[in-house]
Amino acid sequence: MGKTITIPDPRTGFSMKIDGIQLTRPDLHEIAADLGIATKDILFKNTILTVYNTSKASQEIIDDNALVTFVAMALDIPAESISELTAVKAKPKTIEMDDMDEEDED
């Protein structure tokens, strides 16, 4: 029987819908660098951009209610192309592990 391990993920942030553009990895890396967050803290899937708030710089932008404007400027798109700003919390990671036999098979 397998063992399940859950790894908590305390990150919080915002997701937003980006219309009319497909983001590339370099776009995401540029936004992450500008926000001072790690590249693992920004995701893009099915027109939804998720930015986890993991730096002092990103917290200042969020505190100023300027995240949408910041992302629009970074992508050189109108802010009106960004909608559905939603607060998000990262989901814990679950890992399934198989039982390991105590005996070595030599």
Image: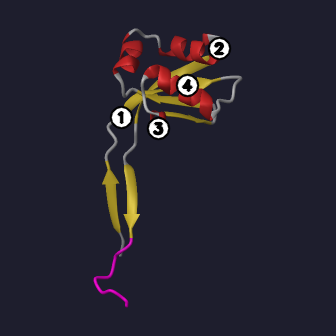
Rendered location of residue 68, percent (x, y)? 52, 15
Residue sitting at the far front: 106
The amino acid pointed to by label 1 is: Arg
Select label 2 or label 1 by which is in front.
2
Q: Range of the magenta residues?
A: 98-106
**Mark 1–mark 3 contact, CB under 8 Å?**
no
Camera-nearest label, 4 or 3: 4
The relative height of residue 75 versus residue 10 in the rendered view (above or below) is: above
Indicate left or right for 102 with 78 as reference.
Answer: left
According to the image, label 3 marks what residue? 40
Q: Position of residue 51 (x, y in %)?
A: 47, 28
Mark 1 secondary-structure assignment? loop
Q: Are marks 4 and 3 in contact (CB under 8 Å)?
A: no
Which residue is pictured at 54% across the width and 30% down the height?
29
Q: Nearer the viewer, residue 49 or 26?
A: 26
| Residue indicated by mark 4 | 30
Residue 99 among those drawn in magenta: yes
Q: Which residue is mark 1?
A: 11
Position of 28 relative to 6 (above/below): above
